[in-house]
Image: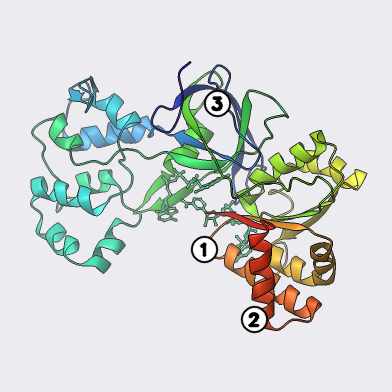
């Protein structure tokens, strides 16, 4: 049987895509079900799925037209096979982010004085590439380039990288199937609406029955405790909720008795709830304690860490009862703030100095009772 991996992704079948958040949400989020049947791929609760995206065909067509090439011209692949330029740009090459190597190769053809200066200046380069793509380069009089043929053009480009998504399902919930919870990246830059490659591919361009190339990315550092009676505290604002759906499914299927506490957060209660229909019965049965921070429903921000701090005494009690703490979502700000709040709670409620609190958290980490999956 064929072994599927990042190097040899499985052509999986998309089963369905539905909105998680409501229309008008500031955090448009979709749920995607994908069949792994026939792949032999197995995963464990806490793992991630790698997805090879496709670029937006409309953007590809605009780019080919801007560089003046024929979309049907064939381009040679490293393995000796060939495909049309259009097909290659849709499925093989990164056309939305500009790396220094791409810009240098592009400029070897464009011979632009403006690009010469930008490439030589690290800070200018960083500012220039932010919010720009290859279509911007190709349509700017000062930076446009004329390639002799399609092969010369694609030789400037880097390969389209796969994106990882926390698996939002337990393998036991629906065997042979995997679910994702994806925040759709959309923004405006230089007067053009743009989208994240993979999140818009999954949300806008993937229909049931379509093929999507995937692989399983093991995440051994993000595992439920073996003891089903141990309490778990899950902190997952935004799409950080994804792996916790797998956690609550797994614990329900296992008839695990350990209490669960989920800290979730999103901007507005009216539009941004996630999996509320699944959470309600768990809360009602007493299996799950749910604390939700609606960040923009009042004139000051309320984030998960504010709710954690207010519930510090109870969190401390759970920790002393052997609870494991899991954190998933934004690495830039949330993860640091939540960790600081945990340290504050340990110090305040546990009567420890800041150094002792840090050492307490380090011990939790060593015991695999503090695990993070942040991006
Ligand atoms: C282990 C792991 C697990 C993950 N799990 C999940 C998950 O469960 N759900 C989820 O949604 N994501 C998850 N992610 C993130 C995911 O992998 C992708 O990074 C995300 O979906 C964006 O990919 P994209 O291809 O849509 O966007 P890309 O095409 O990669 O575009 C993103 C880039 O767009 C640019 N950009 C964005 N906004 C702006 C702006 N306003 N102005 C200018 N430029 C801008 C930035 O350069 C940004 O880096 C996870 C990541 C990791 C590493
Ligand atoms: N690497 C990538 O390419 C990539 C791609 C997509 C997302 N991400 C990261 O993943 C994160 C998750 O995105 P998401 O759209 O699911 O949700 P998110 O942006 O994290 O927002 C979810 C909730 O968290 C709140 N929040 C903002 N700052 C916070 C903080 N410091 N501490 C705690 N909560 C905070 C938000 O409030 P407000 O918005 O009201 O402030 C919102 O209510 C993004 O922030 C982004 O950094 C990375």
Q: Is 249 on the left or on the right of 151, as rendered?
A: right
> Could you say which is closer to the camera, residue 230 or residue 158?
230
**Some atom of ligand 1 lies within 8 Å of the CB belonging to the residue at label 3:** no
Q: Residue at x 65, y 39 (%)?
A: 168
**Some atom of ligand 2 lies within 8 Å of the CB belonging to the residue at label 2:** no
Q: Residue at x 73, y 48 (%)?
A: 225
Q: Residue at x 16, y 33 (%)?
A: 68
> Could you say which is closer to the camera, residue 220 or residue 178?
220
- Per the image, the residue denoted by label 2 is 355
Mark nearest the camera among 2 and 1 is: 2
Earlier-in-chain disc, 1 versus 3 = 3
Q: Is 194 on the left or on the right of 26, as rendered?
A: left
Q: Label 3 crowding class (10 Å Cα cut-off): few <14, some 14-19, many 20+?
A: some
**Some atom of ligand 2 lies within 8 Å of the CB belonging to the residue at label 1:** yes
Can residue 203 be spotted in the picture?
yes
Q: Label 2 crowding class (10 Å Cα cut-off): few <14, some 14-19, many 20+?
A: few
- Per the image, the residue denoted by label 1 is 332
Earlier-in-chain disc, 3 versus 2 = 3
């Amino acid at each position: 049987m064929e072994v599927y991996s990042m190097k040899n992704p499985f052509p999986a079948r998309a089963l369905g895509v539905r909105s998680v958040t409501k229309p008008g949400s500031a955090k448009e989020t979709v749920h995607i079900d994908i069949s792994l049947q026939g792949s032999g791929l197995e995963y464990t609760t806490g793992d991630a799925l790698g997805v090879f995206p496709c670029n937006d065909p409309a953007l590809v067509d605009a780019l080919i037209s801007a560089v003046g090439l024929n979309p049907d011209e064939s381009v040679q692949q490293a393995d000796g096979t060939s495909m049309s330029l259009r097909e290659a740009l849709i499925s093989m090459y990164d056309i939305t982010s500009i790396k220094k190597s791409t810009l240098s190769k592009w400029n070897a053809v464009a011979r632009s004085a403006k690009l010469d200066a930008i490439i030589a200046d690290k800070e200018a380069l960083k500012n220039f590439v932010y919010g720009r793509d290859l279509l911007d380069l190709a349509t700017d009089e000062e930076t446009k380039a004329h390639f002799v043929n399609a092969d010369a053009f694609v030789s400037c480009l880097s390969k389209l990288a796969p994106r990882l998504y926390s698996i939002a399902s337990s393998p036991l919930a629906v065997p042979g199937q995997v679910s994702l919870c994806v925040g759709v990246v959309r923004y405006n830059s230089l007067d053009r609406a743009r989208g994240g490659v993979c999140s818009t591919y999954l949300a806008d361009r993937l229909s049931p029955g379509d093929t999507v190339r995937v692989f399983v990315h093991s995440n051994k550092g993000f595992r439920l405790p073996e003891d089903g009676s141990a309490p778990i505290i899950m902190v997952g604002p935004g799409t950080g909720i994804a792996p916790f759906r797998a956690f609550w499914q797994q614990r329900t299927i296992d008839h695990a008795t350990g209490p669960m506490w989920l800290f979730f957060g999103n901007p507005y209660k009216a539009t941004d709830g996630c999996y509320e229909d699944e959470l309600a019965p768990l809360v009602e049965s007493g299996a799950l304690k749910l604390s939700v921070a609606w960040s923009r429903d009042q004139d000051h921000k309320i984030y998960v860490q504010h709710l954690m701090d207010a519930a510090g005494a109870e969190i401390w009690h759970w920790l002393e009862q052997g609870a494991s703490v899991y954190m998933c979502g934004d690495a830039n700000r949330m993860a640091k703030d939540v960790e600081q709040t945990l340290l504050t709670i340990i110090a305040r409620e546990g009567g420890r100095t800041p150094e002792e609190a840090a050492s307490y958290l380090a011990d939790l980490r060593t015991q695999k009772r503090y695990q993070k999956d942040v991006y």
